[in-house]
Image (cartoon, coloured by chain):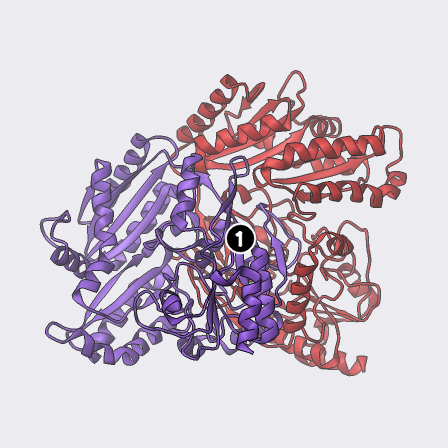
Chain colours: A purple, B red
């Protein structure tokens, strides 16, 4: 049976594109953070949507589970197979072409395996902006971004990946091709299938291509780091910035003092903008479609108002591209500094913005009570209500040993998220890693609707089984 | 059976809230444009989500079809029952409360029967903006706006209704309550159910409440009317405006000369901004979060560049609120002028923006060939690729007689839309009116997925049958 099946796959894509030796498959089977290695029957490497459709039909015929895979940079084990060895990995990496760039419609049409950075660069060469931006952009694929509805640093102004996509091409679990590659900003002809496939983590079908929105490139942007004594004041500053800068406010990130301490410990060459330390820091970016002077004037005006109004204790406004980039590096080095310090227990949560201060205070207190001395590395996209709320051991306790508390700490953090009307996965998705947590926290009515949709679109249950549901 | 069923409904909401006499039901049975009057077993008027859930459960038990209804201002017969008299109308109008306004999270939570204008006003009183704006805002309900994913005049900057909603409460076809009233800007915990219910026109469940996004109110906005000789140049001007004004460009509407002729014929008191006539006019609005001077300078600068670059032949920039409002009235009176002139054959289409000029040229030519002398009333939200492309008879031909050509004209226009990769319903939805057109133009793979979802979520087929599918 397996040989018949693999023979069929070889007939479709050629023998060299069906990897079944362990040594060839290995790079496709391990989560990039190295936490889990699965097994697979084969790795399939199609080069066109027709090949994908034929492969999926062959899998459906043989009841072989399919794990669609892009750049394998996900954080929740969504794109690696389980340990059973029954599934095939369907890698989209050979389908990486940019199919069309329409400067008048401001859209770009790409295959699912295109690397995010290649798309950004293609847009840039046409004088336009594809705003999706995240740490893995040099290796993640747009198919993965779409399947996980990726977030990143530009959500405040441009939305999540779902908001950046106008059309999809999808191979259904039955091996049919849905041509939904529309470049329309308005289309009320039936159910929101595009929105449904986006964020479904490959459990409803295989995204093979997409039409993405492009934007005018801002003429300039400028950055500031603002210090304050509490998350409450960071939230008041956010409100003030939104009122004064409107959609020119393109980023608003929060970092606690402990985050910056970690960064300066592990990356001592990075700037230390303030002489004394403050409890919280907000990293702000203001962009302008007009001029650099306009961006600077807007940012400086708002910060002056913040200092006068007592919303900020100190502030540094970047006066050069190099300074802007230095401030962003502080933010971007937090995950790296964390990793250097040792493994910790990570959470990617979102909250109503009005609940953030209460959430941080309550959760910090509960953790301090249960795990005295534990250290919270709290940073994130405050403008979107998205916190990366990570927990490290107290000084002197081994990071490895501390990981034994993962379940207890998840419970404290996620229970607190639920009490504050938040989400246990803001931008990373569910994958295999958070499936049990989803069962625990999601409304049963909602879970039942999700299962009904899964059963309707994938009646054989072959699409990325064990992920999400 | 009917009496048992109505008795059960009366027990749930009280006898006075179950209308079953023809005279009481009449206002709920007719499409507001007066094109169709259906029949119903009863009109149900619940006052709470629990009552809705119990009524829907009673309907499911008795296999009684349900037609959810809001302000009954839809244009595609989506909210009136068919002629069979088997269905009940479930009116959400008694559920019109504003439940919460969170100024820090910038969200408002409302019941489905709340009138759009009440929501706009509640946001305004808090110094915030709910940007959804359309002609029927004084009588349409937010539940109807959500169920049809309404568009309107602010889509260019703020998106369609789907983009303005963070959370929903829905009564499922089985009579369960899904509490998805989340106020989160990021939430990747499973399938996009919110997006799916939005735009489903009541065929998957009953939306009973929603959490909506609010925005900072712009400090000022200003308007201009620009004249040019072709749609191509209107599109070039759109590109220039987007580059120079970014997200400060909050509206970009197109009107042909014939539209303005109609308006000045039927509403002679309205301004006539230009001495001589031009082929096309663009109505532009620029808003600023900074000041009126900023908005005016941005708009004037861009228009100067357009005149210098030969993208425009003439332009009027409003110098007062009254002038702005006068220019907007020209646009807003087009549908009224049309109605005064007599019935015509309407289309609500969208296209990739890069295809619009070619679409107009090709469709105009085909219609002129098939119906010599017929007059095209073409206007719409050019920035969104959305045209209202309406066809009136040649001078001297009766409008009533001309309506006999509806099918032939629909075929010409919609075939042309399909050839130019567009949509046959940009913002009005499908309802009962465009159901056959949908079957004709939609990819069968997509239709099958829609049917599968409908069958999974509404296995008894009681939710708004005959609409969309």
Label 1: few (<14), some (14–19) or many (≥20) C-alpha neighbours in 10 Å:
many
Horizontal side of A161 relative to B406 (left or right) equals: left
User: Which chain letter goes with mark 1?
Assistant: A
Q: Nearer the viewer, residue B259 or A151?
A: A151
Residue B72 versus residue B153 in the image, above or below: below
Residue A397 percent coordinates (x, y): 13, 76
Find disc 1 in the rendering and name its residue.
A209
Q: Nearer the viewer, residue A281 or B7?
A: A281
Residue B430 percent coordinates (x, y): 71, 55
Label 1: which secondary element: strand
Horizontal side of B97 relative to A350 (left or right) equals: right
Horizontal side of A243 relative to B252 (left or right) equals: left
Residue B5 versus residue B299 in the image, above or below: below
Residue A228 percent coordinates (x, y): 20, 53
Residue B27 appears in the picture as rendered: yes
Residue B373 percent coordinates (x, y): 83, 28
Q: Quadrant of the C terminus of chain B?
A: bottom right
In the image, what residue occupies the spot 59% across and 28% down? B234
Residue B322 appears in the picture as rendered: no
Horizontal side of A342 relative to A165 (left or right) equals: left
Q: Quadrant of the N terminus of chain B?
A: bottom right
Q: Nearer the viewer, residue A400 or A402?
A: A400
Image quadrant of residue A359? bottom left
Image quadrant of residue B24? bottom right
Q: Nearer the viewer, residue A74 or A6?
A: A6
């Amino acid at each position: 049976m397996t040989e018949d099946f693999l023979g069929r796959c070889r007939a479709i894509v050629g023998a060299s594109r069906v990897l079944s030796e362990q040594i060839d498959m290995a790079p496709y089977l391990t989560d990039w953070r190295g936490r889990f290695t699965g097994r697979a029957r084969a790795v399939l490497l199609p080069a066109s949507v027709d090949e994908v459709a034929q492969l999926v039909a062959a899998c459906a015929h043989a009841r072989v589970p399919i794990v669609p895979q892009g750049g394998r940079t996900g954080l929740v084990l969504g794109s690696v197979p389980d340990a059973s060895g029954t599934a095939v990995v369907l890698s989209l990496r050979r389908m990486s072409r940019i199919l069309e760039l329409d400067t008048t419609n401001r859209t770009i049409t790409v295959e699912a395996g295109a690397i995010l950075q290649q798309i950004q660069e293609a847009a840039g060469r046409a004088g336009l902006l594809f705003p999706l931006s995240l740490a893995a952009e040099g290796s993640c694929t747009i198919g993965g971004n779409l399947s996980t509805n990726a977030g990143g640093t530009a959500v405040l102004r441009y939305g999540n990946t779902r908001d950046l996509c106008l059309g999809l091409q999808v191979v259904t679990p039955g091996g049919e091709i849905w041509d939904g590659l529309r470049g329309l900003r308005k289309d009320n002809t039936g159910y929101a299938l595009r929105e449904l496939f986006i964020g479904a983590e490959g459990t409803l079908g295989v995204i093979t291509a997409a039409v993405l929105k492009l934007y005018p490139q801002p003429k300039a942007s400028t950055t500031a780091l603002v210090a304050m004594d509490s998350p409450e004041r960071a939230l008041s500053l956010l409100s003030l910035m939104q009122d004064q800068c409107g959609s020119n406010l393109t980023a608003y990130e929060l970092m606690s003092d402990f985050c910056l301490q970690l960064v300066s410990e592990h990356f001592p060459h990075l700037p230390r903008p303030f002489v004394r330390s403050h409890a919280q820091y907000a990293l702000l970016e203001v962009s302008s479609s007009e001029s650099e002077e306009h961006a600077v004037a807007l940012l400086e005006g708002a910060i002056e108002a913040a200092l006068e109004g007592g919303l900020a204790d100190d502030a540094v406004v970047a006066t050069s591209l190099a300074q802007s980039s230095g401030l962003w590096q502080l933010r971007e080095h937090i995950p790296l500094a964390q990793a250097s310090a040792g493994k910790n227990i990570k959470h990617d949560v979102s909250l109503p913005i009005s609940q953030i201060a209460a959430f941080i205070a309550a959760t910090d207190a509960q953790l301090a009570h249960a795990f005295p001395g534990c250290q919270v590395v709290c940073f994130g996209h405050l403008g979107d209500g998205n916190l990366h709320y990570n927990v490290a051991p107290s000084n002197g306790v081994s990071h490895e040993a501390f990981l034994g508390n993962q379940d207890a700490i998840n419970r404290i953090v996620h229970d607190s998220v639920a009490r504050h009307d938040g989400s246990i996965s803001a931008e990373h998705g569910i994958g295999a890693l958070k499936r049990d947590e989803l069962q625990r926290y999601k409304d049963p009515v909602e879970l039942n609707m999700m299962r009904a949709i899964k059963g309707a679109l994938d009646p054989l249950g072959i699409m990325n089984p064990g992920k999400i549901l």
